Amino acid sequence: MTQPVLPLEPATAGARNFLARSPKQLLIGGTWVSASSGRSFATVDPANGRHLADLAEGTSADVDAAVSAARAAFEGSAWRDMAPSLRGRLLWRIADTIDAHADELAELETLDQGKPLKTSRFAEIPAAAEQFRFYAGFANKILGTTIPTSITHQPAGRQIFAYTTREPVGVVAAITPWNSPLVMAAMKLAPALAAGCAVVLKPAEETSLTAIRLGELMIDAGLPPGVVNIVTGFGAGAGAALTRHARIDKVAFTGSTAVGKLIVTAAQGNLKKVTLELGGKSPVIILGDADLRLTVPGVARGIFNNSGQVCVAGSRVYAHRSIAAAVVDGLAAQAAALRLGHGLDPGADLGPLINRRQADRVAGYVTEAVAAGVEVVSGGRQTGALGTFYEPTVVTRVREDMRLMREEVFGPVVAVTAFDEPEEALAFANDSPYGLAASVWTDNLSAAHRLAARIHAGTVWINCHSYFSPELPKGGHKQSGWGYENGAQGLENYLETKTVCALI
Ligand code: NAI
Ligand code: MG
């Protein structure tokens, strides 16, 4: 199943030239600069360990400089006074430039993150462009209201005139994870820019390359200096400095629930606004009448895509007892057919996990569960020259109280449990601190919508899983997060309301 991990080269001159321009610097106030400490760190190809580039290690001094640049840009006339339609056109141009560089960006994403090129090229890079296109249309549709009031104590002959305006929240810290790097950055940048905010972006230390390239492309597209600043570096360094910074007005974060909680604490100092897109433990409920020809491949994609490194990955499958064995066999067959390999190898269906630590973590969950009696039906092995690959894995005979069933594994591991009554499946599904997403598989329309109403999750899919579009709000209930990205709601994260009440 495991393919040899060749030192595959990018085919585009753009990606080769970009990688040759190392070390990478920080983008502050429209200029690329080295970290104030002079320090850098390496980003590597997780499939084979190949060194890709050195990145500037931003620390709190660099964060201070980036926040000052963002604040100056936020208050400066080039951005503040840009006509809304021109802001919209700028976002559209950014989308076009992402599309025009999609081959190059896809190769960089695949090299840095590991995912198959077909995923980068045909799903994620286009999805990043679509974020900018979607929010481009909002830039000149951010409207206030006029409000008739019930105030009765105005002096004779005078009246009340009241209205609201919407204002950008200010300087935003956008902190992104490594699983889908460019699209995660776009999901924050596009609405923030449509709203008129300025941003300091801190991409994940494992996967900063496409964010840096996007920084170059946004400047070429005409973004005024300082409107987007990029500080690469580590979570405990640059990331933490941003979240406690007194002149950051808002943090938009995607990542682990543990770091989400740290950010809530760090935000206390100036009560900055916070939105959090956190982890999940998404249940998949398969009723007895489900069409397994649709269900089995759909459920397999919902857990194995991106090697399970997906916040909404459907890791807990509850299948009606009448079809549970067929679901297990079907998922095992799907898992066995997936080929592991380097993301640039056209034959690869699944790439590596992001690093050895993550692969060890995934393996640790499975090993612990096996010791407690869980049966591995397919997969279950850590492979690859560096031990960064993990086979797509199907397990059964789990108990609901196992760590495997309660914590976010973030790897290609799915557990199948049989149930007898839909109420039982619902109880299993909702027995989790997380509430990010779920899917229900059935031809029974009423049962599907009744279950959808009672599942505690921000998104419920019916007969599909991991279907996204910029129009569809996405967010977590319970400990899966605060707030929603995408859709009109995604814009709200970056806006304040001001009420003006006048006696005229
Ligand atoms: P993480 O939450 O540490 O990393 C996400 C981002 O947060 C990165 O940019 C990182 O530099 C930054 N960060 C880390 N510590 C920070 C701090 N104290 N203050 C501000 N920013 C900080 O995730 P990690 O450690 O890379 O992965 C561990 C686990 O987290 C995964 O196994 C997975 O379960 C979960 N995770 C979930 C994601 C999701 O989309 N739901 C994405 C990434 C990780
Ligand atoms: Mg890397």
Image (tube, helix red, strand yellow):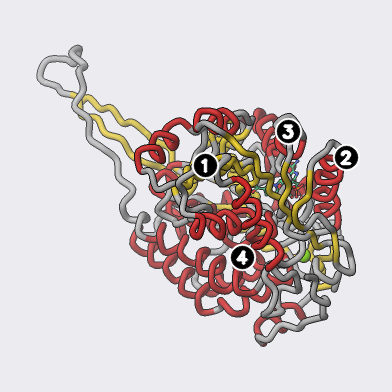
Where is residue 339? Give x, y as percent: 72, 71
- Left or right, 430 with respect to 240, comes to left
Where is residue 198? Give x, y as percent: 54, 52
* Residue picked out by circle 4: 30
Quadrant in the picture for the C terminus: top left
Amino acid, disc 4: Gly
Question: Which one is nearer the viewer's eye here, 181 or 157?
Answer: 181
* Residue picked out by circle 2: 371
The label shown at residue 475 is 1
206 in relation to 476, above or below: below
Mark 4 or mark 2, earlier in chain: 4
27 in relation to 433, above or below: below
Mark 1 or mark 3, earlier in chain: 3
Mark 1 or mark 2, earlier in chain: 2
* Residue picked out by circle 3: 399
- State the SS at label 3: loop
Question: Which one is nearer the viewer's eye here, 46 or 291?
Answer: 291
